[in-house]
Image (cartoon, rainbow, N blue to C red):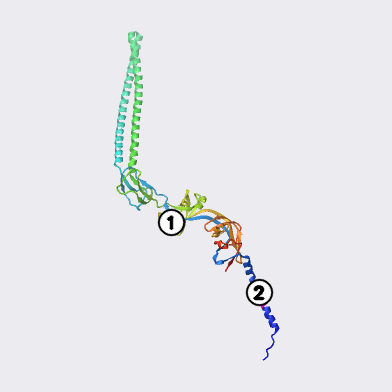
């Protein structure tokens, strides 16, 4: 059977369809071809991390693990040599003023008793001297009074002699003798008065000297009593007894450490901060302390002037409420706020800062082409970095390690 000839129009339609499909394929693949042509390096998109540049407030801080320590932990010492008698055990709760230990010091007790005996003797001597002073003063006043009586008698005789001399009834020598007797009586009275006054001054001076001796001895007794009272070692705070540094009935010398008392109502955080933040630390900075799932306000109160093992020792004190149940040497996370920058351009912190030296970033476009761009960074925080130049709000950049990009100007992020 003879075959019918092929229709030439069908062949042309097939060729036209092939041409249209080829054109569509070329148009569709053109962007991909362009991306492959522009990019010198390709990296799988799943191997990179990206973040968007935003504007907001950047809080520069440092987070460290701190150790809880008692802000008040006085160590108590023996005040005199002797035998120690402990009244409490380690870990026992105590109140302020409670007797914790007693030192038996026979030497100090004997010195106090001797000083008290000397004081009693000097007080008796003072009283005896006061009585003698009044007695001697009375005798001197008696002598002055007798001299005054003699003056009165001499004046009376003088008046009698004057009357007798006026009528010529007395010899001249008797008249003159009466005048001399009056003069002698007046001089004796004056001397008796002066002698009594001077004697009273001397007795008052001696009495004051004796009083000073008594006062000095009272000071000695008072000091010894204070030392004896300090033989009872009292708790200065409400808290708990720490380590006992001596054994029961042990012989101690003066200034021997006996025990420590921990004030459980006042705690601080002893934190070691990396050396890189040392220049930014300042006393008075605000801190946030995480304890029991809650945050508590703190304040940086001390910064060490030296660096040890690339760290700086610091002390953070609770500024308000103190969490309950804290224990000595407990570990707490402490966040110290170094600075706050408001309304700045920033992006999430990542490894691109280290691999790019903080000067390079790759901006990712909608076509997943990452373009290399020079940037300038500013302040750092734990989670973000300030962008000073090179980026705009809304830019998406690669924040993971940039080493796979090998410094290329354009990088294709493949599926």
Residue 266 lies, in percent from the top left, at 42, 51
The answer to which quarter of the image holds residue 34 is: bottom right
- Residue 370 coordinates in the image, percent (x, y): 60, 63
For label 2, the crowd category at 10 Å Cα-Cα, with few meaning under 14, some 14 to 19 and many 20 or more, is: few
Q: Residue 116: name its quadrant.
A: top left
The quadrant of the picture occupied by the N terminus is bottom right
Q: Would you say the residues marked 2 and 1 are in contact, meaning their CB atoms lie under 8 Å apart? A: no
Quarter assignment of residue 106: top left
- Circle 1 residues within 10 Å: few <14, some 14–19, many ≥20: some
Relative height, residue 364 to residue 335 (above, below): below
- Total labels: the figure holds 2
Residue at 63 percent of width and 65 percent of height? 38
Residue at the disc numbered 1 = 331
The span shown in magenta is 18-24
In the figure, 124 relative to 321: above or below? above
Image quarter in which the C terminus is found: bottom right
Q: Position of residue 71 (x, y in %)?
A: 42, 50
Left or right for 32, reference 249: right
Magenta stretch: dominant secondary structure: helix
Q: Is residue 304 visible?
A: no
Secondary element type, mark 2: helix
Q: Residue furthest bottom?
A: 1
**21 drawn magenta:** yes
Residue 24 has which mark? 2
Q: Is residue 30 visible?
A: yes
Q: CA distance from mark 2 to mark 1?
A: 67 Å
Residue 166 left/right relative to 26: left
Q: Which circle's residue, 2 or 1, is located before the other in the chain?
A: 2
- Is residue 19 highlighted in magenta? yes
């Amino acid at each position: 059977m003879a075959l019918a000839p092929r229709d030439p129009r069908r062949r042309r339609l097939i060729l036209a369809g092939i041409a249209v499909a080829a054109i569509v394929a070329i148009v569709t693949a053109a962007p991909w071809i362009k991306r492959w042509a522009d990019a010198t390096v390709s990296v799988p998109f799943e191997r990179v991390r990206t973040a968007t540049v935003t504007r907001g407030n950047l809080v520069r801080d440092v987070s460290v693990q701190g150790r809880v320590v008692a802000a008040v932990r006085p160590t108590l010492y023996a005040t005199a040599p002797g035998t120690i008698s402990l009244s409490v055990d380690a870990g026992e709760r105590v109140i302020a003023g409670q007797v914790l230990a007693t030192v038996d010091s026979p030497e100090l007790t004997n010195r106090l008793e001797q000083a008290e005996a000397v004081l009693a003797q000097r007080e008796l001597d003072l009283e005896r001297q006061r009585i003698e002073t009044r007695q001697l003063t009375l005798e001197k006043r008696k002598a002055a009074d007798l001299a005054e009586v003699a003056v009165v008698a001499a004046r009376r005789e003088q008046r009698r002699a004057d009357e007798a001399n006026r009528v010529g009834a007395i010899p001249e020598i008797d008249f003159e003798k009466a005048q001399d007797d009056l003069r002698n009586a007046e001089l004796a009275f004056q001397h008796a008065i002066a002698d009594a006054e001077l004697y009273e001054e001397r007795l008052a001076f001696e009495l004051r000297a004796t009083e000073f001796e008594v006062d000095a001895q009272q000071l000695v007794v008072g000091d010894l009593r204070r030392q004896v009272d300090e033989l009872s070692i009292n708790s200065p705070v409400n808290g708990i007894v720490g380590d006992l540094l001596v054994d029961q009935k042990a012989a101690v010398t003066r200034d021997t450490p006996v025990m420590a008392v921990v004030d459980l109502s006042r705690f601080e955080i002893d934190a070691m901060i990396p050396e890189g933040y040392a220049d930014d630390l300042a006393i008075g900075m605000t801190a946030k302390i995480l304890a029991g799932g809650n945050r508590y306000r703190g304040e940086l109160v001390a910064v060490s002037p030296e660096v040890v093992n690339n760290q700086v020792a610091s002390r953070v004190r609770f500024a308000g409420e103190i969490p309950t149940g804290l224990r000595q040497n407990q570990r707490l996370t402490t966040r110290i706020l170094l600075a706050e920058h408001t309304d700045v351009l920033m992006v999430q912190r990542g490894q691109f800062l280290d691999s790019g030296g903080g000067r390079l970033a790759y901006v990712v476009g909608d076509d997943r082409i990452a373009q290399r761009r020079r940037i300038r960074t500013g302040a750092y925080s734990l989670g973000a970095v300030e962008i000073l130049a090179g980026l705009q709000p809304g830019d998406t950049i690669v924040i993971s390690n940039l080493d796979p990009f090998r410094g290329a100007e354009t990088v294709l992020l493949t599926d």
